[in-house]
Amino acid sequence: MPFRELSQIQELNRLFLKNLEHCILATEPRGLYEPIEYILAIGGKRVRPLLALLAARMFGDGAESPAGLPVALAVEVFHNFTLLHDDVMDDSPLRRGQPTVHEKWDVNTAILSGDLMLIKSYDLLTRLPFPERLPELMKTFNRVATGVCEGQQYDVDFERRNDVTIEEYLKMIELKTAVLLGGALEMGALAAGADRADADHLYAFGRLTGLAFQLHDDLLDTFGDGARTGKLTGNDIIRNKKTFLYIKAVEGLAPAEREEMIEWFSHSPEDPAPKVARVTELMRLRDIPKLVSEMRDNFQTEAYAHLDAVKGDPVWKENLRVVADTLLRRDN
Amino acid sequence: MPFRELSQIQELNRLFLKNLEHCILATEPRGLYEPIEYILAIGGKRVRPLLALLAARMFGDGAESPAGLPVALAVEVFHNFTLLHDDVMDDSPLRRGQPTVHEKWDVNTAILSGDLMLIKSYDLLTRLPFPERLPELMKTFNRVATGVCEGQQYDVDFERRNDVTIEEYLKMIELKTAVLLGGALEMGALAAGADRADADHLYAFGRLTGLAFQLHDDLLDTFGDGARTGKLTGNDIIRNKKTFLYIKAVEGLAPAEREEMIEWFSHSPEDPAPKVARVTELMRLRDIPKLVSEMRDNFQTEAYAHLDAVKGDPVWKENLRVVADTLLRRDN
């Protein structure tokens, strides 16, 4: 990453973290606010707030990010609310290597403090110094938040189905992850006074980057180099997770191989190595690495075309491109 | 209830119900929207939306309630979201005589569709025909919604404590029930263009009416005539619910009786009749019916003083008084 971009991005990230710490002022009752402080403190990449801040800067938001900051905080608190409730629904024991809220406290605490985080995300949005821009921002926020809930429901529905199509699956990951990336950019730009056309281009840039990122992430899980990614290769296969790769493979395989694939995904053998090896082989047979990386690259190209079309400060446009490139790095 | 008021109130209620039916337009995925339609359809008294509509009419809102309706819908959807999540947290099997959402579907469905209802309540608020009033409305909505969550947490905390003071208990019921009644009125008035002073008086009127109603409800549960209330008298005592009556009695009893009271509230005997009889006797000994009904009447008097101070259309002010009177009817 070039030095100028790196330092500007780090500066925005520091500004965000400094403000995140104090963004929720009330502290009583402790049983409600302590879990919120906990989940907001345990980290994450803070990509969404960074996108919001960069989009606002692109349209002249000042050095202290007066317009971008309320959006960045709202988006990050909203994102953490979804993680908190998703962890309850999936009964996940860990989040970012730490005990989840429902494990550290209990399910009721996780439900109620999650609810309050959702309310606080709207509350943060209203700190915008230009109240006349709030109605437009609210529409985007509501549209995006609704999409995220719908995406979560489709994800649950799809786990029980064996006939999910590629189109349905793409729609699900779009709602579940891509729209919030797009929404962070759209809202950051609108908060700083961007027009509708630029806000739409930035939304599309974020949405398509999100889709590219999801396919990239799925590819790395199965075909990545574990030594470079730092993750267990084949984890999705071991967990019978029906990713884009699986659905695309099942869709295109000959009947016998398709049956075999479905069969592998209905068991969890004690030694997963032969399963991972054979499923990976079947995917290669169907040319999945090439097909999916081409789709990813198409999304990425389309995303950058939208970014190019935005009429914003080229310095901050370049920073945004650097962040997107980082998300899609081959060894990410 | 006088005929004119009755017919005007019924007309508003019809208008509200007609609009409630179609207020959430999306229908897919069904697993997410079906529970929302279900809980919104199973009824309730619809007091909060009525308060919002009446407050808006008082400041000249038109016959179709263009300003009051988005607030009324937002408040009712928000209220039902709290019921949905509260039922999960309390593991209640029934709501208004029907199976709760987590019973009819499952806990995850109840969490996620509740989350979406909270988002939809903000979405409904943005349908206000005067977007310039939205920032002010949002502030009230966020303040009230935060209070409701805090009230719920205090309620949970207090169940585990034996040293809850009267002040703490009043604060809890204020947050848990009274602020939303006040908020419905404040937001209805603001949506129709009322000034801050009138909005504040209406909030105070709703908050104090809510406190009076809660004390009234607690009194009827223990000292009401079951034949007139249609409820089992002594239900709170049987369930060891530490209501205002209990805390006030424990606070004022002599040591021996206080010990006895605490003892009664730590068991659930198979035949509850002797327990109900003795606890009621101890409460009468402490003069609870008189003390609490005086407090209720003081709240009510204070509430009406705030209503009197409002500069609004007297016809609709009178309607609002009629609704409050109905809530506090002695055989309610």
Image: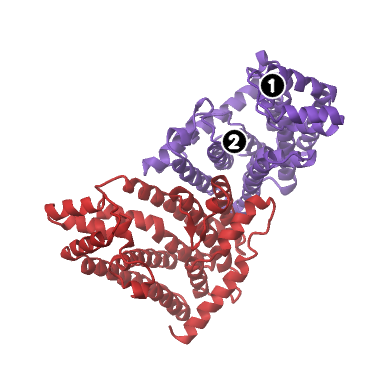
Chain colours: A red, B purple
Q: Which residue position holds label 1? A: B234
- Relative to A169, is A313 above or below? below
Q: Is residue B22 visible?
A: no
Q: Amino acid at mark 2?
A: Pro
Q: Which residue position holds label 2? A: B49
- Relative to B273, is A11 above or below? below
Q: How many marks?
A: 2
- Relative to A63, is B47 above or below? above
Question: Which residue is rendered at x = 55% and y = 49% of the image?
Answer: A110
Nearer to the camera, A79 or B15? A79
Q: Which mark is residue A59?
A: none
Asked if residue A166 lies left or right of residue B156, the reply is left
Q: Quadrant of residue A72?
A: bottom right
Q: Residue furthest top?
A: B227
Structural crowding at the residue carrying mark 2, measured as other residues with C-alpha within 10 Å and reported as few (<14), some (14–19) or many (≥20): many
Q: Position of residue B145 (x, y in %)?
A: 62, 46
